[in-house]
Amino acid sequence: MVSDQAAPAGRVVRVAVLGCGRFSNSTHLPNLAAIEGVEVVAVADTDGEAARATAARFGVPHAYTDGHEMLAKERFDALFSIVPAYARTIDGPEATAARQGVHLFSEKPQADDMAVAVAIDRAVEAGRVISTVGFRERYRPLFQEARERLADVRLIHARVQSARAWTPPQGADADRWWDEYKRRGGWAMEWGVHAVDYVRFMTGQNVASAQAFYYEDASQPVALSQAIHLQLESDATMDIVALTGVPAAPDEPLITLYHDQGYLALVRNGKETWSLVENGETVRTEEMDPWLEHDQQFIEAIRMGDESLLRNDYHDGLASLAPILVARESARRGGVALDVPGWARIESEPPPRSRR
């Protein structure tokens, strides 16, 4: 789509950033500083100290504790929303900005409630703005090659597994750390939307149904394992396993796709390095920064007024978010299988008006 809100040729693209946490400071803000023709005019975070420190670190002139106030007082072309899913609301800064014609970059997960994500999607459509969700691996040539290799085979099963081991803080900060982690939905919520999007991108298939089981130990503040079972549109199956507090098995592929002619595996060797293995043979090893590539392409899409430069938009991202929200609901119901399209439609309906 060609946006009505394209930046005039040669003009600096003015950006505001919502959320001043670790990821903003380590990834998006350094990327924006490195992209020519970008000016970050303001940042906002409910933690005023974090907002002011981030503004000082990157030379941003204005810092706010309220995203709506930032929208009211500043003029900018694009909003980078880098906040937790639970922080987004139906009438939050993302939807308000999009309705006003501000282009939207939303980090994943887009929301922890389908109704909120749909409301933002409708605002994006109403504002006719360029949008994208932070599924950066779509920009990695290795994933694009995997997509090509899978184009002429019949998928049977996809397996994605991630184990996350760490030592949480002790003492005064421990309760706050665990509370934040629980509010974020655990590793299945934080990373599971990526897992769904990986497979959706490489296979071209959406998820038809989902069920999940969580292993929750009363002595632990979060689920130790979250096992999600999915059926794709073609009836092929998919498993996502998200493990918390245990180390990953050495040399185990993050993603394995079994098909009628063998298998394709994607092995993550480091933050920016992946290998593609086909039937036991490594066919590609690649090191690149897909975060920077995605940010650059979003800015260029705004500059050109051409959303086709991007590999996903906010609406497409709903199909990667919905299966994880459905799986969470399945786990709450003891593992019952739920229809993803049907559930998403029901859950995304606006709440009924209260009776006076």
Image (cartoon, rainbow, N blue to C red):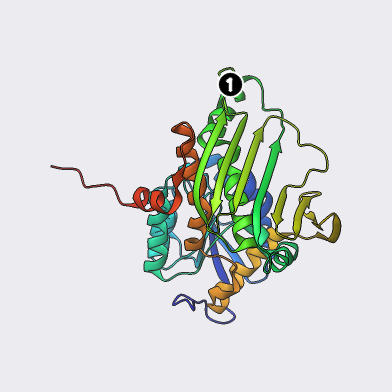
* Position of residue 240 in the picture relative to residue 247 (left or right): left
Which quadrant holds residue 187?
A: top right
Q: Nearer the viewer, residue 262 or 97?
A: 262
Kindly give the residue lying farthest to the right in the view shown. 281
Q: Which residue is mark 1?
A: 217
Q: Amino acid at mark 1?
A: Asp
Kindly give the residue lying farthest to the left in the view shown. 356
Residue 63, visible in the rendered structure: no
Q: Callout 1: 10 Å neighbours few (<14), some, many (20+)?
A: few
Number of numbered callouts drawn:
1
Q: Residue at x 62, y 44 (%)?
A: 239
The x and y percentages for residue 193 are: 57, 49
The x and y percentages for residue 59 are: 63, 56
* Position of residue 172 in the picture relative to residue 251 (left or right): left
Q: Residue at x 85, y 54 (%)?
A: 280
Where does the C terminus fall, quadrant-wise? top left
The x and y percentages for residue 169 are: 67, 26
Which quadrant holds residue 294?
A: bottom right
Residue 271, visible in the rendered structure: yes
Q: Nearer the viewer, residue 351 or 176?
A: 351
Kindly give the residue lying farthest to the bottom in the view shown. 9
* SS at circle 1: loop
Kindly give the residue lying farthest to the top in the view shown. 219
The x and y percentages for residue 311 are: 60, 67
Residue 119 vertical position relative to residue 8 in the rendered view, above or below: above
